[in-house]
Image: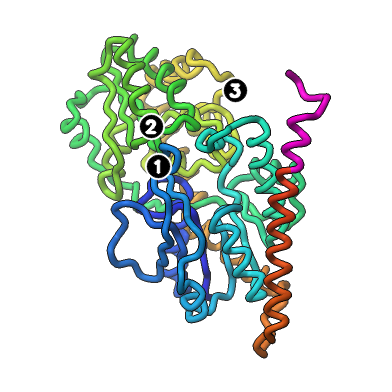
């Protein structure tokens, strides 16, 4: 199968969507499928990439670490012609997502869309952020999903939310899988020694992009409250992002800055080593659609303490592989950390084994099986491309219909957002 993937984020960008695309691409290729990825340019990207087409992009959009893809690269149509895709998989409802829609419609091949993100949680990166902008993001993603042939939801929570919002396209739950072997072994003691963390310290850990939507200032306050009352406790954070200075400030104000260790972005074995240096993984984001970093942490045998939320409740089972907290307070997280730190070793071992079992259920081969089965199914009921070439007039009609659908989608989302912002029932 020839699979064309279009994504607004890709390696070397560090984030859930980029890692998801990279993981599925690698798995599909290992199984003998061809995959062509169309993605924006990013700083420090590899010089030579196989079956990856880069398009020009605005770097660090609005002080974020995202790139914003610009319109189609000259010659992209020829590359896609040579590739002869069987199916198009879009990772976003805008920018290259719109390009994906045009490609699929024009070539009369199926379009799959993964609803990775709760886009309304990210509008602070856009000038003019407002309730109307957040409603626009919801409406645009919903209308885009209804222009596709198949939608992938990364979790049951997201599937239910999309149905509630009016998505009528078939939805399959396909989370991003974890490569268990990548996290099974790690030299945690070496990481502790390098960072000045005592061998017997109780290490609270976190992994991810350090950005406001991840609720990291709240999480850091909760961890700092625990660390301040436990002289042997340290906080080890893997990642970079705009919230880093705020996290450091929390620990500095508490007078325990020497026990916060932000080690930057790590990959492959260095990442596994860092995870194995932790005793527990903490998570407070309310903007997730799936628990990708949670399953990675579990693959390293880490119990999880996390706030309840979409994409989290499917992974964390309270009292089984960690704690799932319904109360969003720093005290709740600090109390859960206290509980875990005081458990007998045999109880901790049970939590770690349950974490490993959970990770196994989310393995990459298992989730790739689901995705490929959906591809095969949608290919069986979406009309095939006519054997003869489309005439010039048919080409024009396909193009006009697609552009009209895109315009209706954007205009409809705008109208709905505007109506919501001026509704007399709207609370002040």
Left or right of 311 in this view: 41: left
How far is disc 1 from disc 3 in space, using C-alphas?
A: 31 Å
Verify CB contact (< 8 Å) between mark 2 and mark 3: no
Label 3: few (<14), some or many (≥20) within 10 Å? few
Q: In the rendered view of the protein, which quadrant contains the C terminus?
A: top right
Which residue is under mark 1?
Answer: 65
Seen at 74% across and 37% down, the residue is: 418
Relative to the observer, which residue lies in front, 190 or 2?
A: 2
Which residue is under mark 2?
Answer: 242
Q: Could you tell me residue 376's position as x and y percent? A: 63, 71
Relative to the observer, which residue lies in front, 204 or 76?
A: 76
How far is disc 2 from disc 1 in space, using C-alphas?
A: 8 Å
Residue 381 seen by the camera? yes
Which residue is under mark 3?
Answer: 326
Sequence order check, earlier mark of 2 and 3: 2
Sequence order check, earlier mark of 1 and 3: 1
SS at badge 2: loop
């Amino acid at each position: 199968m020839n699979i064309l993937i279009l994504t607004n984020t890709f390696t070397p960008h560090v984030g859930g969507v980029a890692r998801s695309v990279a993981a599925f691409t690698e798995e599909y290729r290992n199984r003998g499928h061809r995959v062509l990825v169309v993605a924006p340019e990013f700083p420090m990207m590899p010089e030579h990439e196989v079956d990856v087409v880069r398009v020009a992009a605005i770097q660090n959009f609005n002080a974020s670490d995202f790139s914003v893809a610009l319109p189609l690269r000259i010659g992209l149509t020829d590359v896609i012609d040579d590739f002869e895709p069987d199916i198009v998989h879009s990772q976003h409802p805008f920018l290259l997502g719109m390009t994906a829609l045009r490609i699929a419609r024009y070539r009369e091949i199926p379009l799959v869309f993964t609803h990775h993100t709760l886009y309304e949680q990210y509008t602070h990166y856009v000038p003019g952020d407002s309730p109307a902008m957040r409603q626009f993001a919801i409406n645009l993603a919903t209308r885009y999903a209804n222009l596709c042939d198949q939608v992938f939801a990364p979790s049951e929570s997201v599937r239910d939310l999309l149905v509630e919002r009016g998505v009528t396209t078939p939805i399959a739950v396909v989370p991003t899988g974890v490569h268990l072997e990548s996290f099974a072994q790690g030299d945690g003691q070496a990481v502790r020694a390098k960072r000045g963390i005592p061998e017997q310290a109780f290490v609270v850990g976190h992994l991810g992009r350090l950005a406001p939507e991840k609720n990291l200032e709240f999480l850091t306050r909760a961890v700092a409250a625990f660390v301040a009352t436990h002289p042997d406790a340290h906080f080890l954070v893997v990642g970079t992002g705009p919230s880093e200075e705020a996290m450091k400030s929390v620990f500095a104000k508490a007078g325990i800055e020497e026990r916060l260790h932000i080690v930057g972005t790590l990959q492959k074995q260095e990442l596994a080593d860092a995870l194995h240096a932790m005793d527990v993984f903490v998570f407070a984001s309310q903007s997730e659609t799936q628990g990708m970093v949670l399953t990675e942490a579990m693959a390293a045998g880490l119990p999880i303490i996390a706030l309840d939320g979409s994409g989290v409740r499917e992974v964390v089972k309270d009292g089984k592989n960690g704690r799932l907290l319904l109360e969003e307070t720093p005290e709740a997280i600090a109390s859960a950390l206290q509980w875990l730190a005081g458990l007998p070793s045999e109880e901790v071992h049970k939590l770690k084994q349950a974490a490993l079992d959970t990770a196994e259920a989310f393995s990459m081969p298992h989730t790739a099986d689901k995705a490929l089965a959906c591809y095969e199914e949608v290919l069986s009921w979406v009309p095939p491309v006519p054997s003869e070439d489309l005439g010039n007039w048919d080409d024009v009609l396909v193009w006009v219909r697609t552009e009209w659908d895109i315009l209706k989608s954007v205009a409809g989302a705008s109208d709905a957002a505007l109506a919501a912002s001026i509704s007399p029932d709207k609370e002040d």
